[in-house]
Image: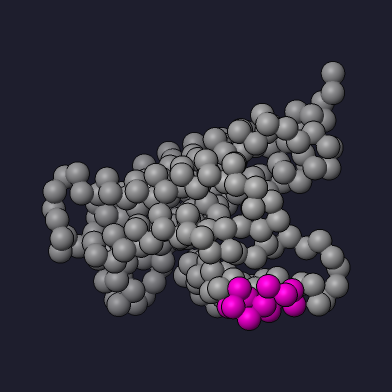
Amino acid sequence: MNIKKHIPNSITLLNLFCGCIALVFVSNKDFETAFFFVFLGIFFDFFDGFFARLFKVTGELGLQLDSLADMVTSGVVPGYVMYFLLANSQQEISSHLYFPFLGFIITLGSCYRLAFFNIDTRQSESFIGLPTPANSLFMLSLPLVIQYSDSIVVFEILTSQSVLLLITGFSAYILNAEIPLFSLKIKKFTLKDNVLQIVFLTLSVLLLVFFQYAGVPLVIISYVLLSVINNRFSLDGKTK
């Protein structure tokens, strides 16, 4: 029995397991623990592919398992978080019982992206549209920003139905937008080939150190903005 071929899929299932646990903590409004398990699930999501390539056991089963696991950890969980945020928001648009279900538009957008990613041959080296794990971390950070921020302005903004609906709609859009985003994978160990990655990682560390949970959405926004700038001016040194 070749044990190695089962290791990547087992790691993928750990991602799914973390997503299921995160759902329980979201339902209990323990968003900090939910964030931890989503982050852990994304960690497993990164390493399942790494070990699949290392052991040379990539296959269709692993691809499907990966998308199904991501659908929970990076699709259902962030949609559920937005549901709770809308349910506890300032009701300047609607107080209808079913209004918060609009938060699951994020889940629908994530599902479409994951399905399209599996058949899109253009995304083998980089991404087109925001990856679902990045979007999930963004959404999971919002209730924590609300919880730990001392700013009344931040609280007012992130508890506004209008703002939350805009975030929901933009999330579904950016997940599937035809916007090339640079890869964080380092394939050549030269400064010239990794300037963009180094700038982004340095900026990310600084944002997280100075802003803690509030730094998470800033990191995701920076990733998109740097990608757009790179697409325009080719900061990675490659010709377009």
Q: Is residue 104 magenta?
A: no
Quarter of the image where one finds residue 44 = top right
The relative height of residue 63 versus residue 229 in the rendered view (above or below) is above
Identify the image quadrant of residue 93: bottom left
Is 108 placed left or right of 5 in the picture? Answer: left
Q: Which residues are magenta?
A: 229-240
Residue shown at the point (83%, 42%) measured from the top left: 54
Q: Is residue 58 left or right of residue 96?
A: right
**Residue at (36% x, 65% y) in the render:** 146
Relative image position of residue 5 (x, y in whole percent) = 79, 29
Judged left or right of residue 101, residue 110 is right
Residue 22 on image: x %, y %:
48, 43
Q: Which residue appears at 66% of the width and 58% of the height? A: 126
237 inside magenta stretch: yes
Q: Is the image coloured rainbow, by chain, by secondary structure, or in one colour?
A: one colour
Task: List x then y, in percent, for residue 193.
Answer: 79, 72
Instruction: Work out which quarter of the rendered image holds the N terminus and state it.
Output: top right
